[in-house]
Amino acid sequence: MTEGSDLTPTRRSRRDVVPASASRAPSAVPTPRWSRRRGVLAVFATVAAFGFVVAYAGPTGLAVSEAGAEAAQPVTLYASTLGDVQTLVTAADDEEVPTFDRGNYEVYVTPTPTPTPEPVAAANTASSGSSAGGWAPPFVTPDPGSAQAIAYDMVAARGWGDGEFSCLVALWNKESGWRVNAYNASSGAYGIPQSLPGNKMASAGADWETNPATQIAWGLGYIGGRYGAPCGAWGHSQAVGWY
């Protein structure tokens, strides 16, 4: 061996000298460090995009579905007929309807007048009684001093004839029989003229309960004022049953 043997290796020694890296088994390719971050970002982006689509498409889809539901509602024959009805506007529809204020006017109703009996013209003959009541009572001379005799004088004093006296006799015969104390228990009428009530005759005298002259005077005044004459009162009594 020379001195240079220390510096120049032999062929064998060259083969034996192998780099440390060559003698090791090949290892797996290392995964780049940024690949995991990229995956996380991709997942996050996908979730965000899906949320945006849901937030935008949700109300729109609901509105579209409601509109579709309204459009899909069935239309009845009556509703479709109403849509085709034509409206006719007349001139009367354009006129303004007047309004009335009830507080600005008053309704006046003309009161019905109370009918008053028309006085019957006095007649001196029996024909007047016949025309009023259908029958004329005959004239009979009254007994002197009787109630009828008192009445005859009062009738003549009023200017009435024998015919009117005959009607008076028939009327009070029907009412009281010419009795001074004749009393109707159902109505309360009293006396020869059947005054209702009896105390009305007090205007002719205080002795109206017992004096025939007082009763006759009051009765003739009533007949003259209401019927004009005895035959008018007699005719009314014949027609309705009272005078």
Image (cartoon, rainbow, N blue to C red):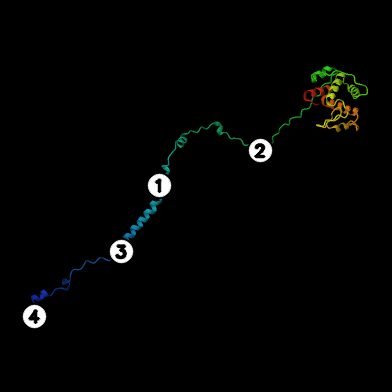
Q: Earlier in the sequence, mark 2 or mark 1?
A: 1
Q: For marks 4 and 3, give the CA distance.
A: 57 Å
User: Are there few (<14), some (14-19), or many (20+) residues within 10 Å of tag 2?
Assistant: few
Q: For marks 3 and 2, give the CA distance.
A: 90 Å
Q: Are marks 1 and 3 in contact (CB under 8 Å)?
A: no
Q: For marks 1 and 4, give the CA distance.
A: 96 Å
The amino acid pointed to by label 3 is: Arg
Q: Earlier in the sequence, mark 3 or mark 2?
A: 3
**In the rendered image, the vertical position of residue 131 relative to residue 45, given as above or below:** above
Q: For marks 1 and 3, give the CA distance.
A: 41 Å
Residue at 41% across / 49% down in the picture? 62
User: Are there few (<14), some (14-19), or many (20+) residues within 10 Å of tag 1?
Assistant: few
> Disc 3 designates what residue?
37
The image quadrant of residue 152 is: top right
Residue 226: x, y in percent? Answer: 82, 26
> Disc 2 designates what residue?
102
Residue at 80% across / 20% down in the picture? 133
Q: Are marks 3 and 2 in contact (CB under 8 Å)?
A: no
The amino acid pointed to by label 2 is: Arg
Q: For marks 2 and 1, give the CA distance.
A: 56 Å
The amino acid pointed to by label 1 is: Ser
Q: Secondary structure at mark 3?
A: helix
The image quadrant of residue 238 is: top right
